[in-house]
Image (tube, rainbow, N blue to C red):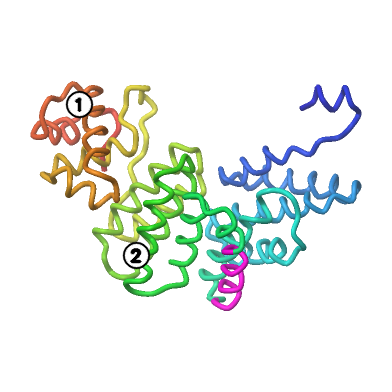
Amino acid sequence: MRTIVTATGFQITNYGALALAAWQGRQAEVDRLVRATTSEAVSRGEGVGLTVSDWASAVLCNGLGRYEDARAAAERVVSDPPAPGVAVHWGPAEMVEAAVRSGDGESASRALERLVRTTQANPTDWALGTEARSRALLSQGRDAESLYREAIERLGRTLCRADLGRAHLVYGEWLRRERRRIDAREQLRTAHDLFVAAGMEAFAERAARELRATGETARKRSAESSGDDLTPREAQIARLASEGLTNPEIGSRLFVSPRTVEYHLHKVFAKTGVTSRGALATFLYGGGRKLESK
């Protein structure tokens, strides 16, 4: 980017760095980049820069659990006229979550309406999964649970690990509030593992707080972990298999097919050298694995 700026004399705003810092929960860096982006955007009359800054602030604050601040930032995004870029389209999703958590159901509903205009115009699994997650936040009972599961199923078919993690997180939060602590732990563990793997520290800590509220402590990665360690999904499936669940039962719990479970178990066996389900418990809980399973 510096080479381009030097060669052309045209200043390029580093929106990517701002988005990355927001997803990773780096407050000081986001503050610095927002100031720089806002200054550059104002000097060039580039309104999209302000929109991106507000969207990044909303993502950051939702991760940190500062929902009133997230709502205020997202409100500015959804109040702006349509502008190019992803931020203006996904700003409503941040608004739904922040407004619901702030007790502002009316604003959340308006944001959902705006989000639907985007998702229905481009009905990919990513778009519809994000819509389902947002609808779930505004729903109750069986309707909410069905939507959370739809969100996880759709986002699980994409490469959008951050959004998948957030779907598991809000589902786990909902389950905990429904007093279904055991079910909540499974979702929150998955969310935490996805966030840690992605370097999303603020969201990971939010998931860890929720886990602690269920009476469980989130596992920590060992500094000695190698590339041969199990992935979060492999560890999750290995743990369930070690508890005696069948492939169809694991698939039903994780919203994946039995064939997908079999694929991951094959990789678990190859990585660990374990040759049977019965030996998995010894490996996972007996010190054979470098990363603790729970």
Write down the quadrant of residue 210 in the picture: bottom left
Write down the quadrant of residue 9 in the picture: top right
Identify the magenta region: 105-116
Numbered label attached to residue 146: 2
Q: Residues within 10 Å of mark 1 (few under 14, many from 20)?
A: some
Compared with 136, 21 (above or below) is above
Which residue occupies the foreground of this view, 21 or 269?
269
Write down the quadrant of residue 223 in the picture: top left
Q: Is residue 114 magenta?
A: yes
Of callouts 2 and 1, the N-terminal one:
2
Q: How many marks?
A: 2
- Residue drawn at point x = 52 percent, y = 70 percent: 100
Please tell me whether mark 2 or mark 1 is closer to you in this view.
Answer: 2
Looking at the magenta stretch, what is its main secondary structure?
helix
Compared with 267, 37 (above or below) is below
Outermost residue toward the bottom? 106
Type of amino acid under label 2: Ser
- Residue drawn at point x = 74 percent, y = 59 percent: 82
Q: Secondary structure at mark 2?
A: helix
Numbered label attached to residue 269: 1
Instruction: Give the left or right position of residue 179, taking residue 203 as reference.
Output: left
Type of amino acid under label 1: Phe
